[in-house]
Image: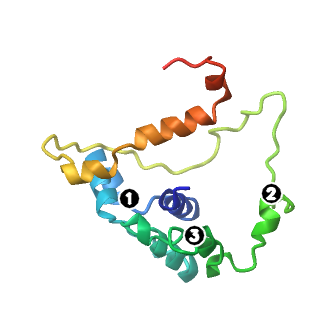
Amino acid sequence: FDHWAWAILNHELLIGDVPFRESVKACPIKLYKAIAKGKVKLSPLLDDEINDMLKQILVRDPSNRLGSLAGGVEDIINHSWFKGIDTDAITKQQIAAPWKPHINEKNSLDGVGSGNFTFEEHVADFDDTDFLTDEEQNLFSGLNDVFLKDWVISNPEEEKGNVEY
């Protein structure tokens, strides 16, 4: 389980943006460099408990991240941010969702894209002279293999031989 990506997702779900917004707006290389350097800037809108948990997970060295220490994922589950949440009941799907969207069975995609979302247009400012160093590039090595392997394992069509690459 990728605790770092999970923490980034939590930040984005809670705030509506990633914790390296300036790098995202600049160009992909700057984003990769920010990730490689561990340069994340948590939103000041986060409360102290989630801020504490995300800071402990978003550590550059994976072996020092909350969730990767001796207590494993239990360290995350036992964090004060989850206080009062029955994670066993969630795992057993014994807790009803607090809100369920109405889905028109005739066309379940009705309403997709009809929300009033704000979107800041991304203007890429690419600098062709900016590259990842070999050390930075090595941090990303093997990721495609991992994603493809996970996808293939979870894809029943692949097992049947119905997927071409």
Relative vertical location of residue 155 with respect to residue 78 in this rendering, above or below:
above
Query: How far is mark 3 from mark 2, CA to CA?
Result: 31 Å
Query: How far is mark 1 from mark 3, CA to CA?
Result: 29 Å
Secondary structure beneath disc 3?
Answer: loop
Secondary structure beneath disc 2?
Answer: loop
Q: Residues within 10 Å of mark 1 (few under 14, many from 20)?
A: few
Q: Which residue is mark 3?
A: 72
Residue 102 seen in the current view: yes
Q: Earlier in the sequence, mark 1 or mark 3?
A: 1
Q: Which mark is residue 21?
A: 1
Q: Which percent across, then down, holds residue 36?
A: 31, 58
Depth check, front residue: 79 or 113: 79
Depth check, front residue: 34 or 147: 147
Q: Amino acid at mark 2?
A: Trp
| Point 67% across, 75% down: residue | 82
Query: How far is mark 1 from mark 2, CA to CA?
Result: 30 Å
Q: Amino acid at mark 3?
A: Gly
| Point 82% across, 66% down: residue | 89
Q: Which percent across, then down, holds residue 136?
A: 25, 53
Judged left or right of residue 103, residue 32 is left
Q: Earlier in the sequence, mark 1 or mark 2?
A: 1
- The quadrant of the image that shows the N terminus is bottom right
Judged left or right of residue 60, residue 83 is right
Q: Amino acid at mark 1?
A: Arg
Secondary structure beneath disc 1?
Answer: helix
| Discs 3/2, front | 3
Q: Residues within 10 Å of mark 2 (few under 14, many from 20)?
A: few
Q: Which mark is residue 99?
A: 2
| Point 79% across, 67% down: residue | 88
| Discs 1/3, front | 3
